[in-house]
Image: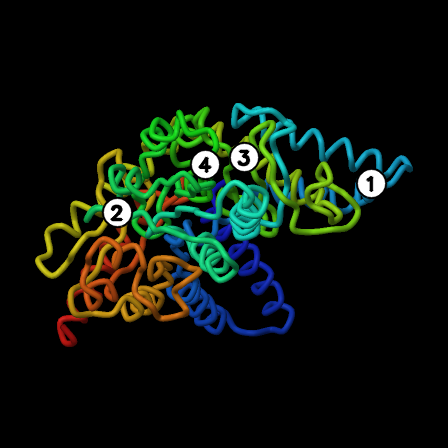
Amino acid sequence: MSSVRIFLFQKLLYVKFLKLTLKKLKIKTFTLIKVCAIMIVLIFVKEEKMIYFDNSATTIPYPEVLRTYQEVASKIFGNPSSLHNLGTKASRILEASRKQIADLLGVKSTEIIFTSGGTESDNWVLKGVAFEKERYGKHIIVSDIEHPAVKESAKWLSEHGFDVSYAPVNDQGFVDIKALAALLRPDTTLVSIMAVNNEIGSIQPIKEISELLADKQGISFHVDAVQAIGKIPSADYLTDRVDFASFSGHKFHSVRGVGFIYKKEGKKLTPLLAGGGQEGDLRSTTENVAGIAATAKALRLVTDKEAYALPKIAKMKEVIYDELAKHKDIVIFSGKDDTFAPNILTFGIKGVRGEVVVHAFEEHEIYISTTSACSSKAGKPAGTLIAMGVPTKLAQSAVRISLDDDNDMGQVEQFLTIFKQVYEKTKKVR
């Protein structure tokens, strides 16, 4: 039964209950008719269905994922390091989840390390690799369009004795391979490049960078795959040359507070947390077993859906793109070909700040964002757009739509209807 049918069924039951109550209270039928009329207005006017187009910020956890979380959290809550039976059960779930994630990504279970999310994973890899290899060199390279978790970690390292170079991107938001090659030095120990840009969806040339680094085994290659999982094939960002990759569960319908790192077998990573020696003596803290089990379930569900979900998402993006492109005061920063993620579409209305557009849609319970969720409250223009050479004022107009399989074409049509209203209203401030 669809959510709409369930909703109407619930209202029908409520009306029947109200009718019986009114009968007992000897209230006239005319009064009942007026009450029912008011209820109909409430159903179709007050109960508007939310449209969530901000899936790159976070996703709605799948019901099956929440059931898994609740089941494990309530029944198998033991510490996986404990020797008793409840601890053993928790440990088995932990390792089964690790194996499932590894199998789905095509790696070994010993190469998966659980964390609290993408930010911790990025921080750990950059700092952990930098300190692990500092005796060989103190030069690292990140791209100009990395997530703040990477760029701020790089900045921190630059303040603690490391030399950081930033690989530029072209005007479409793709890392310039030749410029990256020119930055490599004998003392370079780490290159960190995201798989999918979180602000415009550009898919970075990870395979080409892997080829560039093929004969430079002394350089560790890290990929921030937080926005890639479930959106592009894992083979596109987990190449044989990639040594580390970061992931975050809430970006693919799991709960928040769970992430993981892929660490290629044999590669070393200096621990940042000292304590009980969990995660192979690399990350000391009691593991979030319920969250990890939920994340394994989410990854399986997302992987199972990829074959039909991604074309559906791409089609929705194409429909929105084509409509936006008809308007002269609209600039579209994302492409719709396969060099961009199928779910992300970033655009701007010239002369109108992005937050104005976001709040205009919010009035209709349509939720989009001003590019990166992690940077939006700072009020800064999208760093990716600035790196692409977009003028600051135009970059400040950017808003991001990020779609998911949970969305449908009906929502797209409703979005476009509201877009036309927003576009007309903003003419006054353009």
Cα gap from disc 4 to disc 3, whole angstroms: 24 Å
Mark 1, mark 2: which one is toward the viewer?
A: 2
Element marked by disc 4: strand
Confirm whether residue 249 shows in the render.
no
**Of pointers 2 and 4, the one earlier in the residue sequence:** 2
- Of residues 36 and 101, the one nearer the viewer is 101
Q: Is label 4 in contact with label 1 (beta carbons under 8 Å)? A: no
Q: Which residue is at 25% across, 70% downward?
A: 353
Report which residue position mark 2 lands on. Answer: 169
Element marked by disc 2: loop
Mark 4, mark 3: which one is toward the viewer?
A: 4
**Of pointers 2 and 3, the one earlier in the residue sequence:** 2
Q: Callout 1 environment at 10 Å: few (<14), some (14 to 19), or many (20+)? A: some
Q: Amino acid at mark 2?
A: Val
Q: Name the quadrant containing residue 398.
A: bottom left
Cα gap from disc 2 to disc 3, whole angstroms: 31 Å
**Of pointers 4 and 3, the one earlier in the residue sequence:** 4
Whole-percent x and y of residue 338?
26, 33
Whole-percent x and y of residue 70?
70, 46
Q: Callout 2 environment at 10 Å: few (<14), some (14 to 19), or many (20+)? A: many
Quadrant of the frame with the C terminus: bottom left
**Of pointers 1 and 2, the one earlier in the residue sequence:** 1
Report which residue position mark 3 lands on. Answer: 299
On screen, residue 259 versus residue 382, left or right, reads right
